Image (cartoon, rainbow, N blue to C red):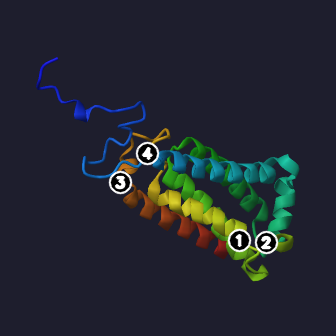
Amino acid sequence: MSSGDDFSQQPTSLLSGVEDDRSDDTPRQGGLGFGLLILRLALGVTMGAHGLQHLFGLFGGPGIGGFARVLETFGYHKQTTLLSWITGITEVGGGVLVIVGLFTPLAAAGLLGVAANAVYAKFHGGFFEGSGQGFEFELLLGAVALSLLFTGAGTVSLERNTPWRKRPLPLGLVSLLLAAAATVVVIVLTR
C-alpha cells in the first residue's frame, strides 16, 4: 500500500455505503431502510390479506359476492361486484408490490385509494372501530400508504436503483393525484 491510500472513504461494515446517493456531510441514517421495510411489510401483509378475504373468501372473508353485499351496506349501490374485484385486486397486487418494494409509490397510491374510500364510507360511524363502524384502522393504513408515496421503498427493496428512489417527491406527487382521482371516481360512480 502506498502512503497516499485514503481509507476514510471505505465502508466500515457490510451495510455501510448502502445510501450511496448522500453527500459526505449528511448524516448516515442506517436504520431508515430497515424502518421502511417494517412499514412496507405491515401495510402489504395487512392489505394483501384483506384482498385475499375479498377475492377468495380466505381467512374467514366474504369472497366477491359477500364483499359486494358489504359494500352495499356502506352506501355503494352501483357496480358493487366490479368494485369488489377492483378493490381485492388492488389490495393483493398493491400489497405484494409494497412488500417487495417495487413501484412502491404507485402501489401505495392504490392502497391509499382503497383506504380513503373505506374512511369515507365509515366516516359517519365515528372515529373508533367499535362494531366495525369506525375508521381509525383504515385511517392508519392510509397514513402509512401516504408516507410510502413520498419516502419510496427505501434501500431494502427491489427498486433500489430506480430514479424515483433517489428523487421520490415528483412520482409521490403524481401518485397522490392518481390516488385522489381514483377515490373521487369510485365515490361518484358507485354511490
Of the two numbered discs 3 and 4 in the rendering, the one whose residue sits closer to the viewer:
4
**Crowd around label 4: few <14 · some 14–19 · many ≥20 (10 Å):** some
Residue 129 numbered tag = 2
Q: Quadrant of residue 47?
A: bottom right
The residue type indicated by label 4 comes to Gly
Q: Which residue is mark 3?
A: 167
Please say if 10 is above or below 117: above
Tell me if mark 1 has few (under 14), some (14-19) or many (20+) residues whose alpha carbon lies within 10 angstroms of its own: some
Pointer 3 or 4: first along the chain: 4
Residue contact at pointers 1 and 3, CB within 8 angstroms: no
Q: Is residue 1 left or right of residue 182?
A: left
Q: In the rendered view, does 22 fall on the left or right side of 70? A: left
* Vertical position of residue 186 compared to residue 106: above or below: below
Tell me the SS state at disc 3: loop
Q: Are marks 4 and 1 in contact (CB under 8 Å)?
A: no
Mark 1 and mark 2 in contact? Answer it, CB < 8 Å: yes
Q: Earlier in the sequence, mark 1 or mark 3?
A: 1
Estimate the x, y position of residue 56 in percent, counting from the top left: 82, 47
Q: On the rendered image, what quadrant is the C terminus found in?
A: bottom right
Residue corresponding to mark 1: 136
Q: Earlier in the sequence, mark 2 or mark 3?
A: 2
Q: Can residue 19 be seen in the rendering of this structure?
A: yes
Determine which residue is flagged by label 4: 30
Q: Amino acid at mark 1?
A: Glu
| Whole-percent x, y for residue 24 in the image | 25, 46
Depth order, front residue of 168/155: 155
